[in-house]
Every structure is written in structure tokens, then in C-alpha cells.
Image (cartoon, rainbow, N blue to C red):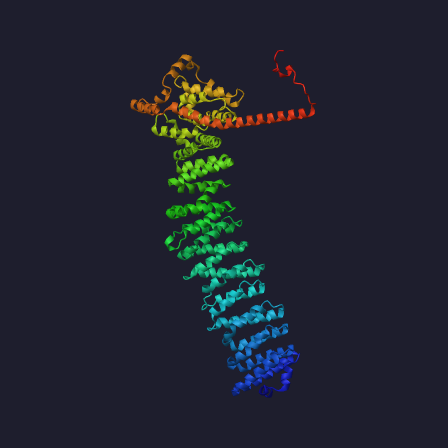
Amino acid sequence: MADALSIIPGAVLRNLADKLYEKRKNAALEIEGIVKQLAFAGEHDKISAVISLLTTEFTYSPQANYRKGGLIGLAAVTVGLTTEAAQHLEQIVPPVLNSFHDQDSRVRYYACEALYNIAKVVRGDFIIFFNKIFDALCKLSADSDGNVQSAAHLLDRLVKDIVTESDQFSIEEFIPLLRERMNVLNPYVRQFLVGWITVLDSVPDIDMLGFLPDFLDGLFNMLSDNSHEIRQQADSALSEFLQEIKNSPNVDYGRMAEILVQRAGSSDEFTRLTAITWIYEFVKLGGDQLVPYYANILGAILPCIADKEEKISVVARETNEELRAIRADPSEGFDIEAILSIARRELTSEWVATRIEALHWIAALLARYRAEVLAYLNDIFVSLLKALSDLSDDVVLLVLEVHACIAKEAHHFHHLFSYLIDSFHKDHVLLEKRGAMIVCRLCVLLGAEKVYREFSTILESEGDFEFASVMVQALNFILLTSSELAELRSLLKQSLVDSSGKDLFLSLYSSWCHSPMAIISLCLLAQAYHHTNSIIQSLGEEDINLKFLVQLDKLIRLLETPIFAYLRLQLLEPGKNAWLLKALYGLLMLLPQQSAAFKILRTRLKTVPSSALSSENIKRSSSGNPYSQILQLSDDSKRNQDAANIHNSINFPARLQQFENMQQQHRQPAKSQQQHKSMSNSTLSHEMQRSEETRRSSTLPEINQPPSRSSWSIPGQMH
């Protein structure tokens, strides 16, 4: 200290602490000249003493003017040392950096000025202090004083120039500093950080792309900043990096994919759009590297497909198509279970488009990796079954395709139809609104005959007779009206002449017995008119109720449709189709005369040629083979013989008994309910009578005499 005081005149030291800037500046120039002489003489010990004096007595002084003087003095020492300043930087720089935290804004300003002048002199030698300087600049960029901010910006630009020139800069040491600060919300700090990222990325010798995963999330976070300028800067930086990724052969897609997946779910539209755009490029470029991340990527894409922002939705759809087009192997890390889990989760999405794409994924996986998907079927099957009740028709149609693919195995086939019937049982609205669509689509996908046989087999043993009746009526109506079932109807029309038709007829017959009108429709379709007449004649009073008449009304109207055109044409030959005529008249007799259906059927029957309606012709026709009209389809005697054999193999009396037995079972619950109601009414009446007697006995005076003889007489008996 004494050496320093002897080197620097007292007047210079007093002026260095003066409140006037000009005096401090002149004193600094004096110190600069003294240091130059000492450096020229090689007296570095004295220079160190001068630096220590300026540090101890000035920069750490409690008085602000002393601190200001110390800072300008240290800068003057550095300027005086010129090329030899590097060996004294360990003494000079720390007190300047410490002054960045000074409470006095003017001291902080002069600290920026001092460090700026020091940096101009030492340039590349300055790099050893870079991390500390960067930390200080980061804080000063958000300083509350505008002048300090301006000084910090000037210093920042100089430091950037020095770093870009230096070959000693360590990006590995810098990245942790950057990563720690990337989630700071202060807009000035964010601008400062983006500026450094952009500058360093522009340096050819610095590989910022290799460290992109360390600060990528922070850049995406800035896309939702309130400041348009910051959003623009972050987007510009990201666009530049994406372009570099496209041109680079070595990119760590995996770590960045995880970040993008998270950002794709951002509430900010611009962030979502940017993230999805990056994912799209990654899917095209990443190849095998992204295989382990497919499930996570899919989980990010599917919700965005239904995004309200059209740009996001379009990019998400394109990304989804690219991802689904990639053929990956489970042995390469392609996690089928994880992807199925994502698809199952999105089946419950509130957005129809997302649910549809989730089903497309399940269908695609089934087509490519059937064995593997079926191994995880228990995890998704319930969700797929529940999707049959989806509010969207498009979803239901697609999920039916998935089910049809799964149902190639017999046990899955049976499980599907058991669940469907159970769902219709629990939700009659589903049966009413979606039943026809579901059944018709399954008939197209799995074969109408196979579908109807399965439904019939399950319904035959259905314990809830009322539901079984409703379900059979629904299936029967679909059978009679749907264009998809035209071939099935054609086969049933051949029931009496073709073995396949006969087998189908008998397969449906058992469950169709749950509904009188369904069995009548089936027999009319099969042209078993004699049996139709037998069914009609067997109906009892309990069978002809309101529900029956409603179904009969539907059937009469269906008889006027093209589906039953063959039946109406047969009425042109009533002599050959007497049992058909009798069956139709039987139905007419069951209809109320004032109903529209009665008038429709009566009008139709009036058109039957009267010349062929003689009692003798009808009697002769009806006394012969009841199915002669079917057996006369061909002149081929062998074919007629085969048809006769098929007809004879159907035991119609047994079928009639089967129908009557089933109807008897249907009547039992109704009778039990009626009996229960009667018993309840009787019990109630008895209780009311006893109550009345008790009330009367409590109000009448006591009578000791026995009742008169007349009180024992039977009402209405003559005395």
C-alpha cells in the first residue's frame, strides 16, 4: 500500500474520488501514464500494488464517488498495460464484476463502462472470465435503470464479438449457464438469451445444434410470451435450427421429440403449431431414431387433429399419415402395446376426428401385427365395445370395421354379438336409433347369414322374453327392409326348395318364435304359406294385443313394397296360392276395420282376379299339396324331386308346436303379473272392508240380543 501511495501522487488520488466526473477522468489519465512507465520498466510488482490500492481503498469503499473512481482507475491501469494486461486480469476484473451488484445505479453504469474498456484492450484473454461476465450481463439486461441497460447492451455486443473471434470459448461450459436461465420470464432477459443463442449458432466452429435439446424447451416457452418481439425472435431462432436439422446427418431426435410432445399440448396456438410442424419434420427425417417415441408422438398428434385452428389440424393430419405409413418392427423397439394404449385413451376424446383416427390406428395395427395386437386385446376390447354406443355414426361404422377384423376368431365373434345384445338390452334407445345401422354394417363386413345365425342362436336362449321379442322384431324389420340383406332374403325365398335356404329358415325360426309377427313375416318370405296360415290360426286372445297390431300394421305396409312384389304377383293365381290368400284374409280379420292397414290390405285383396276365386277352385287347390306353387318352379323332374324332399324334411307340425310352446312361455309372465295384480286388488279390497267394519262397530251401540233371522238370509232370497 505504501509503495502505491509513493507511486501515485496524493492529488491524483483525491481527484480520483472527486464527485466531478471530469476530475476523476483526468486522474485516471494520470494513472494510465504512470502504469505505462512502470510497465515499460518491467516493474509489475508496483503495478500490482497500484491495482490493490484502487481495489481496496476505492472499489470497496462505502462512498459511491470512491467506487466510481476505483472503477475508472482499474480501466486506466488496463489501458496503460496494453499487451501486458493479461497477467493482471485476475486482480482487475473481479472487483469490476462485484460492482455490477452495487446498489447505486451510477456505480453499476461505470462498472459496465470500465469492463467495456478493459475488454477492448485484452480481447481474447478476457474469455477466462466469460461465465461470470455472462451471468452479470444477464442480470444487467433487466436492470431497473435505463442507462445501465444501455451500457450493458454495449458491453454485451463487445463480448459477443470477442467470443465469436476466440478459439478458447468453451460451449460445453456455457450451455449449463444457458439452460439454467431459459425459463426466466423477464422479457429483457429472454431477449438477451435469444440474442446469445442466435449469435453462437452463427459461428461455424460452435456446434449449437448438438446442444439444442438443452435449451429447446426454453425457446418454445418463449413462443407464448406477451411481447411480439420476443415471440418473433424465438420463432426465428427455431426456424433456423429446424433448417439446420434438415441439412444435418447427425441429430438427436429422441430427446427433442420428448420436448415437442409436451409442447404440442400447449394452450398457446402458436406454440402448438410450431411443435406440430417440428414433429412433422421429425417424422419424415428421424426414421429409426424415433421408433421408441412413436407412441408419445401419436399421443401428441391425435388431439391436435381436432384442433380448432385449421393450420394445426392440417399439419397434425399430415403428420399422422406419415407416421402410420412407416413400417416398423417390434424387434426394433416399436411398442405396439404403448400405441394401443394411446389409441384406447383417445377413444374417449371429446372430439370425433380424434376418435376416428384412434380407430384407424387400431385397424392399421390389426392389419400389420394381428398376432401382437390380439395378445393385448383384453386391454382395448372393452373400450372398443363401448365405442359402439358413440354418438357419432362415423365412429360407430369404423369401430364395427375394427370389430369385424377382430371377429375372424370364433370366440371373439361370439363375444361381440353377446355384448351387442347385452347393450341393446340395457339401452333400448341404442337399438332403436343405431340398431339397423350396426346390424347392416356387420352383415356387410361379416356376412349377413353368419350374423343372423349368431343373433338367432343367442336370442333363442334369452331369458327376458319381452326384450327377446323386441330384438327379434328389430332384426326382422331390418331383414325385410335393408338393401344389404337382399341376398339373405333371396336365400330365404328358396327355403322350401334349397337346402341352404332351409337351414337358414330353421336357424332363424327358433328365435323368431319370440314374436308372432316376426314368424309370420319369416314364413311369408319363405313362401311357407300353409304354415303361415297355421300360425295365424294358432294365435290366442292374449297374443293379439296393441304391440301385435302395431307390428301387423308395419307388415301390411311392407307387403306393398318391392320386396314383396313376388307375393303380390302370386295373387294373380289364387287357385295355385290358396294358402297365401287364406293367410292374407286371416291377417285382414285380425285388423280393426277402421285402421289404415285394414283398408290397404282389403284394397289389395279386391284386386285378386274374381274368376279364380270360386270356392271349388280354392277348395281343390287347398286340398292338394300346400306347397305345390313352389314345386312347380321348374320342369326338371329331378329338381322338383329334390325340392319335394327338402320340403318334406321340414317338420312343420313340430315347428308349429315349437311356436305355440314359446308363446305359452311368453304368456306366463303376463298371466303371473295379472294374477299378482288381481291378488293385490283383492287384498286391498279385503283390508278396506275390514277397516270399514271396525269403524262401524266402534260407532254402533252394543246389542245383546242375537241377530234376527232375516239378517242371515242370502241377498235376493225370497222370504
Find residue 61 and report its image quarter: bottom right
Q: Is residue 419 visible?
A: yes
For the N terminus, which image quadrant? bottom right
List the single residue furthest toward the front. 704
* Residue lying furthest left: 638
Residue 416 drawn at (x, y percent): 43, 39
Q: Residue at x 64, y 27 (%)?
A: 691
Rendering coords of residue 347 (x, y %): 48, 46
Q: How many marks?
A: 0
Is 701 left, or right, of 578 in this rendering? right
Return the residue nearer the eye: 514 or 448: 514
- Residue 282 versus residue 587 in the image, above or below: below
Looking at the image, residue 456 lies above or below residue 94 = above
- Residue at image position (40%, 52%) is 326
Residue 281 image offset from top left, x and y in percent: 45, 56
**Which residue, as the protein is rendered here, is positioned at the far top?**
719
Q: Is residue 698 left or right of residue 398?
A: right
State the image coordinates of residue 92 (x, y, percent, origin top left).
55, 79
Specify whether residue 329 is in view: no
The relative height of residue 203 versus residue 437 in the rendered view (above or below) is below
Q: Is residue 639 above or below residue 309?
A: above
Quadrant location, the C terminus? top right
